[in-house]
Image (cartoon, rainbow, N blue to C red):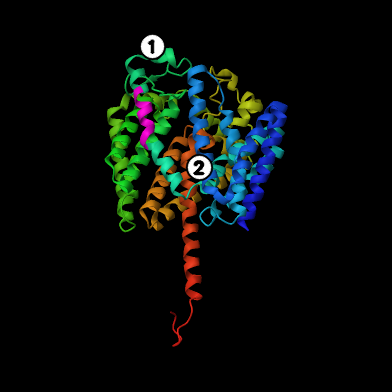
């Protein structure tokens, strides 16, 4: 039943994507879509050798993510839309996998009930709010992206080749990034002469240098990948017992700090604080959870002690201390998001109207109504530089509650997967998925990481695997039980 729902969902999202894209950009994007759609259809034809098809998609997605970033940094080519197209065009992989009965959805079913309730409320809000039809279509696609990535992750993981690809990337990416970061820190001019369009002007307040970017265009990508891979390297060391993963983790930690990204650094520290919780067997998890809280408290207090002036300065900008006017973009988005949720209670202002990618592209009416033109940064790319305000502003507090519950359901399922993992391989994936979710959730407070396939691809794959592994284990147990029932009887009436 749920498999049929997944097939229908992928078809509907597919149709919605094509309709919205053709409406916005006409036949040119339509041609690109045709080529993009053709690739996964050919891959889906390999469903009898499905693992190979899944590997091709994962490698292709990584190639597009890293390749578009390199081209943007070298020559200013903005090709990130290819990542979005490749993601949505891969939906046939999920549909074929679900239709063949080779996916077990026990771990992910609880996520979609509150998510469905959110969409119902958001659509009703859009009828009575300030939404435009195109904005609604676009925002629906944007909102569903993290959950499609989790579904896609479930469809492409679960075999040894995926595991080898992931570990190879984690073990070796730093070998490319570290020399580039060192070059940028030692000789910024030489670095900029090669990577002309990299955003290297921002200051790293932690190191007193420019923010390192590696081969990415923006430091946030370096900080996100470095923080994530630092955590995965630790779980890989616990599995493989290779000291090279500890070296990789330390290097990634340095790269994260060198990026100068505050959100990613705080998220990385949060992930490191959660390490005591995921280490060791199920017994004693309560004590380790308490230890994680203690570690996080100590790290937070230490950070405030050493960076007190800097933290207070940032807090004043956000109007968290003092009596000044809110002017920092993300703080304004949260503040006015609260205002909209309260003013248009209980439904909010409608999809694609505030704090979202759709609002930034197609509908500035609510921004104008709130007086955003008075800010110097109005009209720049910071209008959707957060994640959560769009949900309580556009769908009200009730809609936001359902959407937030869907993420809580993901977290609970990950904890259950962590507690029920038996093999070392399952422990690696469940630990990595748990830490990846904590990392992304911490970043999402100030960044739309869940909406960015380039950043959420690997976390989504890990989470998808962890949510499905309980279903796969259930399938194996059912098969074993049936085999026991049909074993032939000996002459004395006992099973042979």
- The x, y position of residue 167, in whole percent, is 39, 41
Q: Is 192 included in the stretch rendered in magenta?
A: no
Dot 1: element: helix
- The x, y position of residue 3, in whole percent, is 61, 55
Residue underneath mark 2: 55
Magenta residues? Answer: 171-179
The residue at 48%/52% (across/down) is: 467
Residue sitting nearer the eye, 135 or 471: 471
Disc 1 packing (10 Å; few <14; some 14–19; many ≥20): few
The residue at 41%/43% (across/down) is: 164
The residue at 57%/25% (across/down) is: 79
Give me the C-alpha separation between circle 2 and circle 1. Answer: 39 Å
Disc 2 packing (10 Å; few <14; some 14–19; many ≥20): some
Hey, which residue is sitting farthest bottom in the picture?
Answer: 492
- The x, y position of residue 326, in whole percent, is 49, 25
Give the number of the disc on residue 189: 1
- The x, y position of residue 188, in whole percent, is 37, 14
For the C terminus, the image quarter is bottom left
The residue at 49%/58% (across/down) is: 472
Depth-wise, is mark 2 or mark 1 nearer the camera?
2
Q: How many marks?
A: 2
Whether residue 466 is situated above or below residue 224 in the rendered picture: below
Dot 2: element: helix
Per the picture, the main secondary structure of the magenta-coloured stretch is: helix
Q: Is residue 227 left or right of residue 301?
A: right
* 2 or 1: tag closer to the N-terminus: 2
Q: Is residue 386 left or right of residue 261?
A: right
Q: Is residue 131 visible?
A: no
């Amino acid at each position: 039943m749920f498999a049929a729902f997944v097939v229908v969902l992928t078809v509907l999202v597919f149709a919605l994507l094509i309709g919205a894209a053709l409406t916005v950009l006409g036949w040119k994007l339509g041609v690109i879509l045709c080529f993009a759609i053709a690739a996964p259809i050919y891959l889906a034809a390999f469903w009898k050798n499905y693992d190979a098809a899944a590997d091709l998609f994962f490698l292709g997605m990584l190639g597009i993510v890293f390749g578009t970033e390199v081209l943007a940094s070298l020559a200013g080519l903005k090709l990130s839309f290819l990542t979005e197209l490749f993601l949505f065009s891969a939906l046939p992989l999920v549909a074929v996998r679900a239709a063949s009965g080779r996916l077990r959805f026990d771990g992910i079913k609880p996520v979609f009930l509150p998510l469905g309730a959110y969409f119902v409320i958001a659509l009703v809000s859009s009828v009575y709010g300030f939404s435009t039809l195109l904005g609604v279509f676009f925002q629906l696609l944007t909102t569903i992206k993290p959950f499609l990535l989790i579904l896609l992750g479930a469809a492409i993981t679960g075999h040894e080749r995926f595991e080898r690809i992931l570990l190879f990337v984690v073990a070796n990416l730093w070998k490319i990034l570290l020399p580039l970061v060192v070059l940028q820190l030692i000789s910024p001019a030489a670095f900029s002469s090669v990577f002309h369009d990299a955003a290297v002007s921002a200051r790293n307040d932690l190191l007193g240098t420019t923010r390192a970017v590696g081969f990415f265009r923006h430091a946030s990508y370096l900080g996100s990948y470095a923080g994530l891979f630092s955590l995965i390297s630790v779980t890989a060391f616990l599995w493989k017992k290779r000291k090279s993963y500890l070296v990789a983790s330390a290097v990634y930690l340095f790269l994260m700090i060198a990026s100068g990204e505050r959100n990613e650094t705080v998220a990385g520290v949060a992930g490191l604080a959660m390490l005591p919780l995921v280490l060791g067997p199920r017994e004693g998890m309560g004590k380790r959870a308490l230890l994680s809280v203690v570690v996080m408290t100590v790290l937070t207090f230490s950070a405030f002690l050493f960076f007190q002036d800097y933290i207070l300065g940032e807090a004043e900008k956000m109007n968290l201390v003092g009596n000044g006017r809110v002017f920092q973009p993300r703080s304004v988005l949260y503040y006015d998001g609260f205002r909209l949720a309260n003013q248009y209670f209980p439904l909010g202002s409608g999809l694609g109207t505030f704090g979202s990618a759709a609002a930034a592209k197609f509908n500035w009416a609510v921004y104008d109504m709130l007086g955003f033109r008075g800010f110097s940064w109005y009209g720049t790319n910071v209008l959707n530089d957060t994640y959560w305000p769009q949900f309580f502003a556009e769908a009200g507090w009730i809609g936001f509650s359902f959407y937030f519950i869907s993420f809580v359901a993901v977290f609970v399922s990950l904890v259950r997967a962590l507690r029920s993992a038996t093999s070392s391989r399952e422990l690696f994936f469940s630990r990595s998925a748990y830490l990846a979710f904590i990392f992304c959730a911490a970043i999402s407070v100030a960044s739309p990481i869940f909406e960015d396939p380039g950043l959420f691809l690997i976390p989504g794959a890990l989470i998808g695997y962890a949510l499905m592994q309980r279903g796969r284990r259930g399938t194996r147990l059912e098969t074993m039980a049936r085999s026991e029932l049909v074993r032939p009887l000996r002459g004395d009436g006992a099973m042979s």
